[in-house]
Amino acid sequence: MPRIVTLLFLLLLPTFALAADPSSKPNILLILTDDQGFGDLSLHGNPYVETPFLDAMMGESVELTHFHAAPLCAPTRASLMTGRHHLKAGVWGVHGGRDYMDLGQVTIAERLSEAGYRTAMAGKWHLGKTAPYLAYNRGFDESWVITDRLYEHADPVLDHNGVEEHRVGWTVDSLHEIALEWISAENNRPFFFYLAHPYIHEPYYAPEDLIEKYREKGLSESFATLCAMTEHLDESLRQFFENLKKTSLFENTIVLFMGDNGPIGNPVNLPHLTDEEMNFRNPANLRGVKGNPYENGTRAPCFIYWNNHFSPMVSKQEVDITDMVPTILELAGVGFDSKEFDGVSIVNHLENGEAIETPSRFYANHQVEWKGKERLYDFLEDKSQLEFGTQNLAIRSGNWKYVRSYGNEELFDLKADPSERHNLLDAHPDKASSMRAELQTWWEEVRELEESYEMPVFVLPERIGAETILDTCAPQVLQGDVHQGSHFSFDWERNEDGIVFGVRVPSDGKYLVRAVVEAKGNDLVLEVGTKDSRTFAELSNGKFEVELGELFLQEGDQNLGLHLVKAKSNPGIIKVVEKVVCTRVQ
């Protein structure tokens, strides 16, 4: 099981970081957008989309034109919160239990909170779906995490520190309202606000008047709606900053804006974008899309603004998502050990344009491969099954980039060939060999870490009435013919088919266990328990929530199994087990 460590090391932070006058520290506003690629701005040559506010902000800021995130959203978020490569932070995918950030990681919010900052976030968290993996468990004083209607982009349902809230209107506007209200509520301490927009992730929705504007440009319904979403985000940001500037806090606020990965064009509610339309979103002619380790999969828009501190410039300094945490900490005057991070501070570059020497950068996508795997979210029984030769990885060192992906090996000189069109593997075999060896050594060391390529441990609540949701897509063990899916487990057909969760019980206590299932047939029994305590319930035909009964669980780490029990002659099956809920009752 992944480890959970305490945060005692925070007490060992340099005393100057803890003793500094909080009122002298800058405010920090961190903004992350979803699936907004480098070319999704008019400033970067997109011939159709209109983003006047972001274009103007870029011109007033240090624009980092060679900023790279991870190839996908949850991995980027893990690195943004920790300053570490996402595999080291326990995140190795976007669903299927692979998106729970290891509980031993220390977040930027925890570090800043310890240094006197008030902290909050709103939007898409995507680093765990239940306590204690949620934002308000990870250093944020307050969080408004979208739990339902995340990608409908309107009327969101939010988890506000464990309490459900409903908002009416466009999500992008609601998040800005939350941020402005929270930021304005106090001026005695510096603030850190993390604004994580789900825009412009598919499905594509936007105000009708904006969609019509782009239809009149002759664009398809899909591309018109995407452009409308992007302009809607831009305009909502403009209004938010206009109101923020009316407060006394903006003058000393550092703004960091970035996208979380490259573009993708496959909305579920509209026809996919054509190759031509995707090219309009990629005027720099970069290779790849979201999800792969090529330049257009990881390069995203980014700027850092601090009025009267950073002179505006367009920078070609190579910057990685892991650089953000050490950079923010240095700007905030918070001490740290650089060995804790995979990234480096770029403050000297921001202040005077000094070139920063960067370490080798490593990229890994969500398609983890092993022998016998058939589906994207097939269950990985043991990470010893993973071999370097089958993984989708890349390494960048200076201008050179080595890619080992989808069965191919490629070497690129990014200075001469930023579009990654010319494979130099045969022309520079020694360079390819050395980079391959460095990548393999790094990956094999990461694979052996306790945090990497693991399913989460679910921590059951200690407070009476509190509950923990156990995602059935995230078991420690899969038994029988059950299949792991992106959000649940399915095809429970045989007697004793089941899953086993890793759970942590904080103290001896009794828990009521419920499950959401979809069954086909009657006289099925679903059993849950540990080796010392078990309970069960009979299932009927249909989809429903069933109360399985109460379990007395002892303090400590243990396995909690969920199994199908039925007579041999019974043809019935459980089609889906969506989730299991454990509520502390005693």
Image (cartoon, rainbow, N blue to C red):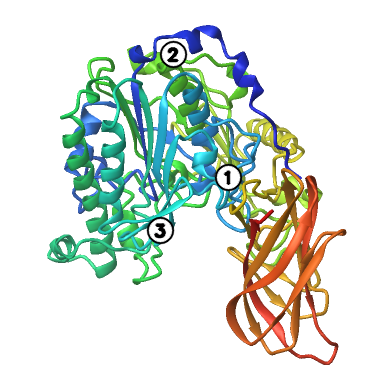
- Number of disc labels: 3
Q: Nearer the viewer, residue 408 or 166?
A: 166
Coordinates of residue 412 in the picture (x, y in percent) = 53, 38
Q: Is the Cβ of the residue at disc 3 closer than 8 Å to that at disc 1?
A: no
Compared to 329, does 418 lie above or below? below
Q: Quadrant of residue 1?
A: top right
Real-space Cα distance between discs 2 and 1? Answer: 27 Å
Compared to 540, does 31 lie above or below? above
10 Å crowding of disc 3: few (<14), some (14-19), many (20+): many
The residue wearing badge 3 is: 150
Question: In front: mark 3 or mark 1?
Answer: 1
The kind of residue tagged 3 is: Leu
The kind of residue tagged 1 is: Tyr
The kind of residue tagged 2 is: Gly
Coordinates of residue 287 in the picture (x, y in percent) = 44, 48
Real-space Cα distance between discs 3 and 1? Answer: 18 Å
Real-space Cα distance between discs 2 and 3? Answer: 35 Å
Which label is found at residue 333? Answer: 2
Q: Quadrant of residue 191?
A: top left
Coordinates of residue 577 in the picture (x, y in percent) = 65, 71
Q: Which circle's residue, 2 or 1, is located before the other in the chain?
A: 1
Q: Is the Cβ of the residue at disc 2 closer than 8 Å to that at disc 1?
A: no
Q: Is residue 150 left or right of residue 488?
A: left
Q: Which circle's residue, 3 or 1, is located before the other in the chain?
A: 1
Q: Is residue 165 left or right of residue 505?
A: left
- At x 35% / y 63%, what residue is drawn? 152
The residue wearing badge 1 is: 133
